[in-house]
Amino acid sequence: MLLLYQQPKKLLRFASILSIPIYATTQNSARLGPTCPELSLPFPSPSPSPKTLNGNETRKEVNGEDKNGMSMNVVEHIDKTAFSMWIPAISQHFEGDKAEIVIVGIESHICVTQTALDALGAGHRVYIVRIKSYYLTSPPFYYNT
């Protein structure tokens, strides 16, 4: 397995152990492919038909277990075409109280950045976790806003 997937897998497992809700998005899976299977994000079997929301999001009802039998608390897994994952299907879960949000992703120059800016604009506290690169010596980086 590539080192790229190790840290996100650990974070997903950690969130599951602590019953922290997980919100996942995939960028335009019709053109770019699905979320990497190495993350073991659960999908119900059989997979439901996606529903289009607001013309640019596809919603998949998600819950279940990863490949090791660990229950994962995935609230939403959305296919999106916007750069930000702060789309209505996700942001609706954060209306009201201000939340602490941890963002993990591989497209930090656009998708992670835009999501963080949008969540900050909505008044939430945002933490960005840089995932490990292919290099063993690359330390993790945590950015706290």
Image: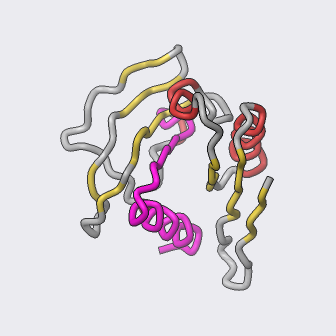
Q: How is the image coloured?
A: secondary structure
Q: Is residue 100 left or right of residue 23?
A: right
In the rendered image, the vertical position of residue 16 relative to residue 26, given as above or below: below
Query: Residue at coordinates 43% horizontally, 66% vertically from top-left?
Result: 13
Magenta stretch contains residue 88: no
Q: Camera-side residue: 77 or 56?
A: 77
Horizontal and vertical percent position of residue 65: 27, 57
In the rendered image, the vertical position of residue 69 relative to residue 60, given as above or below: below
Horizontal and vertical percent position of residue 112: 70, 47
Query: Residue at coordinates 19% horizontally, 39% vertically from top-left?
Result: 46
In the rendered image, the vertical position of residue 35 relative to residue 120, given as above or below: below
Residue at the farthest front position: 97
Q: Is residue 38 left or right of residue 68?
A: right
In the rendered image, the vertical position of residue 112 relative to residue 8, given as above or below: above
Query: Residue at coordinates 47% horizontally, 18% vertically from top-left?
Result: 53
Q: Is residue 134 left or right of residue 110?
A: left
Residue at the farthest bottom position: 137
- The tally of labels here is 0
Residue at the farthest left position: 46
Q: Which residues are magenta?
A: 1-30
Horizontal and vertical percent position of residue 108: 73, 51
Horizontal and vertical percent position of residue 90: 53, 33
Query: Residue at coordinates 74% horizontally, 66% vertically from top-left?
Result: 142
Q: Quadrant for residue 119, please give it.
A: top right
